[in-house]
Image: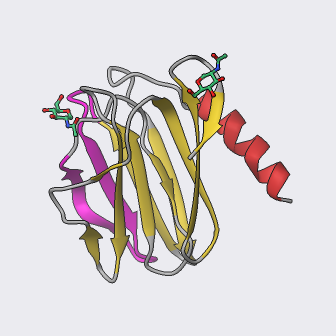
Amino acid sequence: MAKISSISILLMATATMASPDRPCLAAVSWGDPRVDLFGTAPDTSIWHKFYTGHDWQPEKFERVPSHAGTCPSISSWGDGRLDLVWVNETYGYVLHKYFDGGRWGPSWDDAVNLGSGVGVPQTYSWGSGRLDMVGIADNGSTGKV
Ligand SMILES: *[C@@H]1O[C@H](CO)[C@@H](O)[C@H](O)[C@H]1NC(C)=O
Ligand SMILES: *[C@@H]1O[C@H](CO)[C@@H](O)[C@H](O)[C@H]1NC(C)=O
């Protein structure tokens, strides 16, 4: 089962390889009926909107403070949890931001720097507290973090 998940993540990584000038979308649900939608704008910022079951909020997309060099990867391990990972436009650092307890961490403006050397990171979670990340190393090999 875990092996099948890894394979699908790798295929997804290939499919979502994109540059900021080619906007992309990524969606996830933490449970019925919630849907969170993320995308990159041509100015490289990540935008967010979510479906509540009644309507989409906010009315326009909200801009997450970011300079993304890749499509963001979004995953959730449960109710109220989001994990957002992307590669920064400059210096190639993999950055992580999470939504938990009704707010963004480590803060709305900041992201956790997970280091560099990996492109097109994709995340997946099989349960609470667990986040797996697969990416393509700068030398072309596939690795996990
Ligand atoms: C991310 O990219 C922006 C804009 O390109 C740059 O100003 C910033 O220093 C970078 N941050 C990190 C952590 O590399
Ligand atoms: C790529 O880099 C990783 C991490 O440094 C290393 O383990 C791997 O052997 C390298 N692969 C190639 C094909 O050079």
Task: Please say if 105 is above or below 143.
Answer: below
In percent of the image, x 55 and y 44: which residue is there?
122
**Residue found at the very far top of the displayed protein:** 139
Q: Is residue 48 magenta?
A: yes
Task: Please say if 113 is above or below 51.
Answer: above
**Residue found at the very far left of the displayed protein:** 109
As rendered, which of 87 and 46 lies closer to the eye? 87
Q: Quadrant of the N terminus?
A: bottom right
As rendered, which of 8 and 111 lies closer to the eye? 111
Task: Please say if 126 is above or below 66.
Answer: below
Whereabouts is ligand 1, in terms of quadrant? top left
Q: Quadrant of residue 87?
A: top left
In percent of the image, x 38 and y 47: which residue is there?
114
In percent of the image, x 46 and y 77: which residue is there?
53
In percent of the image, x 48 and y 29: which residue is there?
119
Figure coloring:
secondary structure
- Secondary structure predominantly adopted by residues drawn in magenta: strand
Badge count: 0
Where is residue 92? Give x, y as percent.
33, 28
Where is residue 38? Give x, y as percent.
39, 50
Where is residue 79? Give x, y as percent.
50, 81
Direction from residue 139 to residue 97 in the image, left or right: left
Q: Is residue 119 magenta?
A: no
Q: Which residues are magenta?
A: 41-65
